[in-house]
Amino acid sequence: MSITSDDLLDRCDYVPGFLDALDAALFLQLAETQARRDTRGHLLEIGVWYGRSAIVLGSLKREDEELHVCDLFETPPPTAAGRRELAEHDVPLEGPSRAQFEAAYERVHGELPVVHQCASSMLSARELGSNQFRFVHIDVDLYQPTLVTYGLSGWSSALLMNLAEKYGELAARALRLMGFNINFSPVLDLSGDNE
């Protein structure tokens, strides 16, 4: 790929959000690894907010791929921790509207992703089709409830501990960047990748 993490951040610089340079670099590293390994599939983001990370993901999708996004829009975070985090950053509790997200995304990409305006627990093969997803980004506030919904909480805790031992502070962010198919089975294992 000829894009840099700085390029990715420049594309969404005007969009409010918490995606930072390290996140963008991890997104790019995963996309480059997937390209080298010819990993195929669409991209999915659960928890969009204003669309900062969705814009980055849209920059990483290939021509034959779709970006799917899922968000309730205009709804406060479902957890007390999520509401506290927004308050700490002096951010309004109400989420942005779908129209605000779509305007920001379209400004950069000239088209819209596939939008699922619903709770992530409502996503199913009917909504997502028979698509395989090579990249799933789960927003931090939705992360634990979503893993519980899909029966992955025990699996993720063990993996997170393993990653934390190996990589320290990067572990939580790296865990969000694993590739999954529609059944949330890993399609890309970076544990032995030293490239």
Image: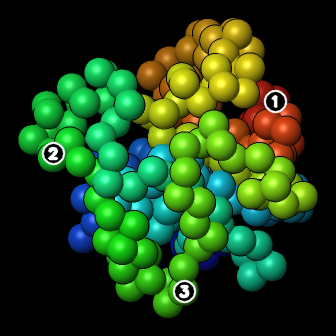
What amino acid does circle 1 point to? Gly
Q: How far apart are marks 1 and 2 (CA)?
A: 39 Å
Query: Which residue corresponds to the image point at 83% horizontal and 51% vertical from the top-left?
Result: 125
The residue positioned 44% from the left and 83% from the top of the image is 106
Q: Please tell me how crowded label 3 is: few (under 14), some (14-19), or many (20+) other residues with Cα within 10 Å.
A: few
For badge 3, the amino acid type reads: Glu
Quarter of the image where one finds residue 171: top right
The residue positioned 42% from the left and 45% from the top of the image is: 22
Residue 87 in picture, x, y percent from top left: 14, 33
Looking at the picture, tell me which residue is in the foreground, 142 or 136: 142
Q: Is mark 2 on a helix, strand or loop?
A: loop
- Evaluate if marks 1 and 2 touch, with contact meaning CB atoms under 8 Å apart: no
For the residue carrying disc 1, how many other residues have a C-alpha within 10 Å: few (<14), some (14-19), or many (20+)? few
Q: Is mark 1 on a helix, strand or loop?
A: loop
Q: Mark 3 points at which residue?
A: 111
Q: In this view, does 134 lie above or below 82?
A: below
Q: Mark 1 points at which residue?
A: 192
Work out whether 163 lies above or below 60: above
Can you say whether 168 is above or below 20 in the image? above
Which residue is tagged 2? Answer: 91
On the image, the x and y values in percent for residue 188 come to 82, 42
Location of the N terminus (image quadrant): bottom right
